[in-house]
Amino acid sequence: MITYEEHRLRSLADAGRWIELLGAYRQARAAAVALDLADGGGAVAAARSRAGIATAALGHLIAYAAPPEVAARLFDADGGPGTAAGVADHDAGPLWEVLATRHTWRRLAPLIGPSPVRRLVAQTRVLLGEDLSWGAEPDPEGVPLVLEPWESVGRADGMPVREYLRHGGSRSALLTLPASREGLARVELPEPGVRLPGQSATRALAELAGWARTVCVRGSAAGAAAQLAPGPRVVGGYLPFALAWPALVQAGVADRAHGAAHGRLALWRVLTAMTGAQRPESADRAEVRALVARMRCFTWDDPADRLRHLHLALEDPATGLSWALSGSEEV
């Protein structure tokens, strides 16, 4: 049932009265923060998070449909304490990702000040195919501001950024790897590889996909898969890293508060760690490219899979190490 207030706000949007809508958003968000704190709701950060949920639908409409000069002000603090949207504010997805899907970086760059939001918007524009390698400030971790070749191929195969709708909701690719049984065959896995604890790349994988199990072994990708697969015989096979890339990026989108930019940044931390570098900014990009070029990727099926699933092993033949991650959950 549409309330009078919802009808009024939609009428303002239809009339293009975006400044008034921005004012209504800020007023509602500040009031929600104040009410939560008055009711003993806890810390300011938690109160602002709950306020973001309460005003998410209006924030989504502004981020989606307002002119960029107005929409970018969702994240400005010039409206007073508690009025600005944060990185985690979301409806069908984070408000900054909604905004980033609607306008080019050239339009948005002068409007968003230095902040985590600015970085995530820039990385989203890169995922959408925009080349920011000229004219944009470098990423603080050195993550490229243009898609690498394998990312471009993967983007064409499965776009990881949600497609948002004006009045809420989104369309997005479903995280499934393997996506189908096509090209896979019944295979006998080898003995499980010997686990190697304490690897930084394993920790990075766990941070990428917190809902999946992760492991590092000395041995082949199939030997890593044997540590996590449901049995010694699976339906599986090898595939290029580019075809696994979309699912890996989507694995970092843990919930609606996260966007595809989180997944790309987390995946670059994984690849960096696999080269032996500690952080992306300390890695030679040529080393990451060489790693991806020689990497062998093995995927397999699990009869118990739910709607969202990922089963993948990544082997670096140069070091003899392999990593695997495997998980399945409802969405």
Image: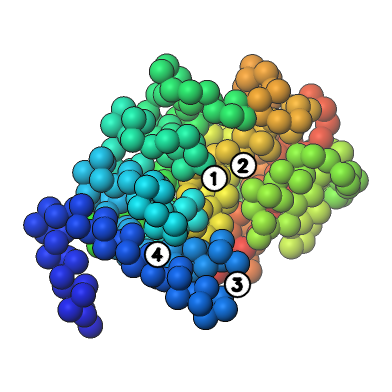
> How far is the residue under mark 4 from the one under mark 2?
32 Å
Q: Nearer the viewer, residue 203 or 221?
A: 203
Dot placed on the residue nearer the N-terminal end, 1 or 3: 3
Residue on which the image places disc 3: 42
Sooner in the amino-acid sequence: mark 4 or mark 1: 4
Q: How many circles with numbers are drawn on the protein?
A: 4
Q: Which mark is residue 262?
A: 1
- Left or right: 43, with 230 as reference point: left
Amino acid on which disc 3 is placed: Gly
Q: Nearer the viewer, mark 1 or mark 3?
A: 3
- Disc 1: CA contacts within 10 A as few (<14), some (14-19) or many (>=20): many
Amino acid marked by disc 2: Ala
Left or right position of 151 against 10: right
Task: Name the mark on residue 266.
Answer: 2
In the structure shown, which secondary structural element does the residue marked by tag 1 occupy? Answer: helix
Which quadrant of the figure contains the N terminus?
bottom left
Task: Point out the tag, 4 or 2, that comes first from the N-terminus.
Answer: 4
Could you say which is closer to the camera, residue 310 or residue 163?
Answer: 163
Q: Which residue is mark 4?
A: 30
Alpha-carbon span between mark 1 and mark 2? 6 Å
- Mark 4–mark 1 Cα distance, whole angstroms, equals 27 Å
Q: Secondary structure at mark 4?
A: helix
